[in-house]
Image (spheres, grey):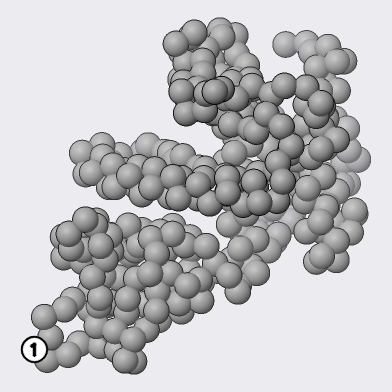
Amino acid sequence: MNKTSKEKEAVLNVFAALVRPLMRVAFEYGISAGEIAGVVRRAYIQALEARLQEQSRPTTDARLAAVAGLPRSDVSALRDALRAGAPHSLRASVSLDQITALLTVWHTHSNFSGAYGLAMDLDLTVVQGSPRRSFRELVALACPGVDEDALLDELVAAGSVEILDSNTARCLSRAYVPRGADVTRIERMGRFLGVVTANFVHNLLRADEEPIYFERTVVSDEMLSTPGRDNFLAVAGEKGQELLAELDTFLTRLTATEQNTSGKKYGVGIYFFEEPAASESAGRPIERIQTGGISSAKPAPLEEIDVLAPVRRKE
């Protein structure tokens, strides 16, 4: 399908908007423009190769180079790097999925949680006659085969767990937000920036028979003071965590009947953000519940508009 120059320019502006906030990270870690360009080229070739394979078309270096507008020698080098598995960054020994799975089981499984979903204290080593379960048993159930010491270290470092009396693990929070390990935090950022972007791409390019993925935003009508921001942040954090805990428990029950090894993972994220004062929306009213951005061949049904509007009313 042919696209207009205005549409292409709009897409390029989206790329710029995505990249611009990441420049702070690039500067902080000494990443050059050339390195970023190399990552983009490699990702482009990888995605293009997958697309041609889906269309049962040849994926020679020459064809990829012609479509991508790159020298054939560059494409050959990029594909060699991909085949060699050259990493963009280090991988953590304990994954985010393993940590979140453990916290979910700790708060939802009857062997490890009590009334109102409160996580029980666990023994770090087996104590003869102790009425409590052990952390090892939790790891064996939630993510078997994972290094329990590595898991515990990650949870303690993130402030999700504390150690009492050298042999008791107490869960402080169902949330896992790593504090000290830069690699883990960076990889977490990359993962969820990717899925947020995929949400908008799905809604923009979806086929008629595909569902519209939930995407709503609430933004203050006017500029807020720092105390106002802090007040909103506190309420958003409290209510958002309550909603996520409820959804997490629902998913635990859902997977018991709907698990499918050939399926996909799905999730919901809640993010607090600030909108730059120089943005296009500055100086004009902003919808209380933004419903824009869900672009498709068919618009969203009217019933979905302003679904959260009752939360904030004018006096």
Q: Where is residue 215? Give x, y as percent.
A: 54, 28
Residue depicted at x 77% and y 31% = 14
Whether residue 311 is visible to the viewer of this picture, yes or no, is: yes
Query: The residue under label 1 is which amino acid type?
Result: Gly
Residue 269 left/right relative to 285: left
Q: Which residue is mark 1?
A: 129
Q: Residues within 10 Å of mark 1 (few under 14, many from 20)?
A: few
Q: Quadrant of the N terminus?
A: top right
Residue 181 found in image quarter:
bottom right
Between 208 and 133, which is closer to the camera in this rendering? 133
Residue 220 found in image quarter:
top right
Residue 94 left/right relative to 83: left
Residue 109 found in image quarter:
bottom left
Q: Where is residue 78? Give x, y as percent.
A: 78, 50
Residue depicted at x 29% and y 47% = 249
Residue depicted at x 82% and y 45% = 20
Q: Where is residue 11? Give x, y as percent.
A: 78, 26
In the image, farthest residue toward the left: 129
Between 289 and 199, which is closer to the camera in this rendering? 289
Between 214 and 303, which is closer to the camera in this rendering? 303
Counting labels gives 1
Whether residue 98 is visible to the viewer of this picture, yes or no, is: no
Residue 16 left/right relative to 137: right
Q: Quadrant of the C terminus?
A: top right
